[in-house]
Amino acid sequence: MQVTLRKVGKTPLDFEVKSDEITFKGYLQYHADKLILLKAKLSGKITTVCDVCAEEFKLDVNEDIEFFISDGIYEKEEDSILDVVESFDSTIEIEDLMNSEIELIKSDYNSCENCKNS
């Protein structure tokens, strides 16, 4: 789902993207300057690898996601916002954002139930 950032206004623009066993649902809303607020929930199951035994397992995910999307390069230094994704063509691909959030979760330390209990 591709969104043109210039069309996002003060009224929240709802979105929902599903992939395999995961759902990314939320909204985009104009914040200030060239910043768009993304608030969403990532829920479902993802397949990842246990960092202890190296076996694949399904990880339950239920994460609240919130960050800003900048329509162009984000240059503010005095009120620095750390979670900003920059878009250089005034569009954003929601699936790409979902996939990057999934990869962030996978890169964390994850252990399967067997390893947690031993």
Image (spheres, rainbow, N blue to C red):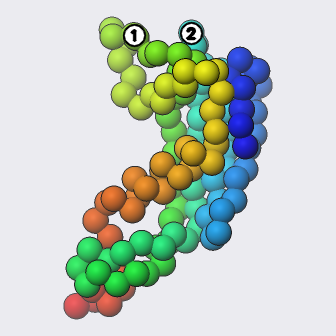
Q: Is residue 35 visible?
A: no
> Which is more toward the observer, 48 or 66?
48
Q: Quadrant of residue 14?
A: top right
Point out the image quarter for the C terminus: bottom left
Q: Which mark is residue 76?
A: 1
Q: Position of residue 44 (x, y in %)?
A: 59, 68
Q: Residues within 10 Å of mark 1 (few under 14, many from 20)?
A: few
Q: Is residue 62 above or below residue 34?
A: below
Q: Quadrant of residue 43?
A: bottom right
Horizontal arrangement in the rendering, residue 9 relative to residue 108 (left or right): right
Q: Earlier in the sequence, mark 1 or mark 2?
A: 2
Q: Which mark is residue 33?
A: 2
Residue at the (77%, 25%) spot, across then down: 11
Label 1's element?
A: loop
Q: Which mark is residue 17?
A: none
Residue type (three-letter) at the residue carrying disc 2 = Asp
Horizontal arrangement in the rendering, residue 60 relative to residue 52 (left or right): right
Point out the image quarter for the N terminus: top right
Residue type (three-letter) at the residue carrying disc 1 = Lys
Residue at the (48%, 50%) spot, across then down: 101
Q: Position of residue 72 (x, y in %)?
A: 53, 16
Q: Position of residue 12 (x, y in %)?
A: 74, 30
